[in-house]
Image (cartoon, rainbow, N blue to C red):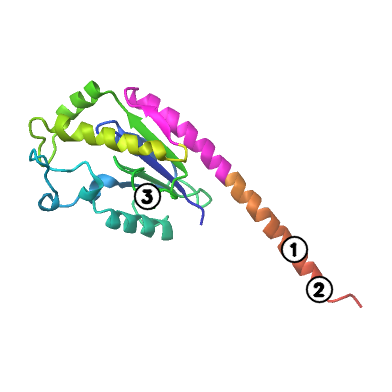
């Protein structure tokens, strides 16, 4: 079965979850997997020399469990997760995976049909982060001592990525971001649907010809 997988990554508090949920409301047969659901327990998170819990690294996540969840969806995309059900069975099932470290995890590289990365400036990111409540809560200096440096490190690692990533300005309004990405996704889905139909045509034609050749000669 054809599927369409969207990756939405980016800086902390960049608007990843909001964008994913807005897309899900408007895309038929759409499910979401959030990377934040796969953090390891606090007792398993390492600390650095400053005593900062190392949450913004891949090692803080149970990526094997996340990959298993994705595999289950791929095997049965219409039934694996809660999804919008407004589409017909003809619609291509869509999976949105959102999280802050998607494009730094190699086993996911071949999965993406479309990749988006939200960015916001340092000051805006710090301001937004200060308004959020985390468990455990951010300690003084945590943003400058761990969160932002890790974001810059992982962003630099992405320079070696060979597939296309669409970078989004996270300071735009929620509505503008949704419109930009939704239009892009709809175009890509239309292309995939067209290609799928083209692939079926030779098989159907071949089937008809095959039956003709297999007929007994008329007497």
Q: Earlier in the sequence, mark 1 or mark 3?
A: 3
SS for dot 2: loop
Picture disc at residue 106? 3
Between marks 2 and 1, how big is the CA–CA gap?
11 Å
Q: Which residue is mark 1?
A: 208
Dot 3 alpha-carbon crowd within 10 angstroms: few under 14, some 14 to 19, many 20 or more: few
Q: Earlier in the sequence, mark 2 or mark 3?
A: 3
Name the front one of labels 1 and 3: 3
- What kind of secondary structure does the magenta stretch mostly adopt? helix
Residue at 15%, 27% in the rendered image = 130
Q: Position of residue 73 (x, y in %)?
A: 38, 56
Residue 205 to residue 148: above or below: below
Specify the farthest residue to the front: 49
Name the front one of labels 2 and 3: 3
Q: Position of residue 45 (x, y in %)?
A: 14, 49
Q: Position of residue 88 (x, y in %)?
A: 50, 49
């Amino acid at each position: 079965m054809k599927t369409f997988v969207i990756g939405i990554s980016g800086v902390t508090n960049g608007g990843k979850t909001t964008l994913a949920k807005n897309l899900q409301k408007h895309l038929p047969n759409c499910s979401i997997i959030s990377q934040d659901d796969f953090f390891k327990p606090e007792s398993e998170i390492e600390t650095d020399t400053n005593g900062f819990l190392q949450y913004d690294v891949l090692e803080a996540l149970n990526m094997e469990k996340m990959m298993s969840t994705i595999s289950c969806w791929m095997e049965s995309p219409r039934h694996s997760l809660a999804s919008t059900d407004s589409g017909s069975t003809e619609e291509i099932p869509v999976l949105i995976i959102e999280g802050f470290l998607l494009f730094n995890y190699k086993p996911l590289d071949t999965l993406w049909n479309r990749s988006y990365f939200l960015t916001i400036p340092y000051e805006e990111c710090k301001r937004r982060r200060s308004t959020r409540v985390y468990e455990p809560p951010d300690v003084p200096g945590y943003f400058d001592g761990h969160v932002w440096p890790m974001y810059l490190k992982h962003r630099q690692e992405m320079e070696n990525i060979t597939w296309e990533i669409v970078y989004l300005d996270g300071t735009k309004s929620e509505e503008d971001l949704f419109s930009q990405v939704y239009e892009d996704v709809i175009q890509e889905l239309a292309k995939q649907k067209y290609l799928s139909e083209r692939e079926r045509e030779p098989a159907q034609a071949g089937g008809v010809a095959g039956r003709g050749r297999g007929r007994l000669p008329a007497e």
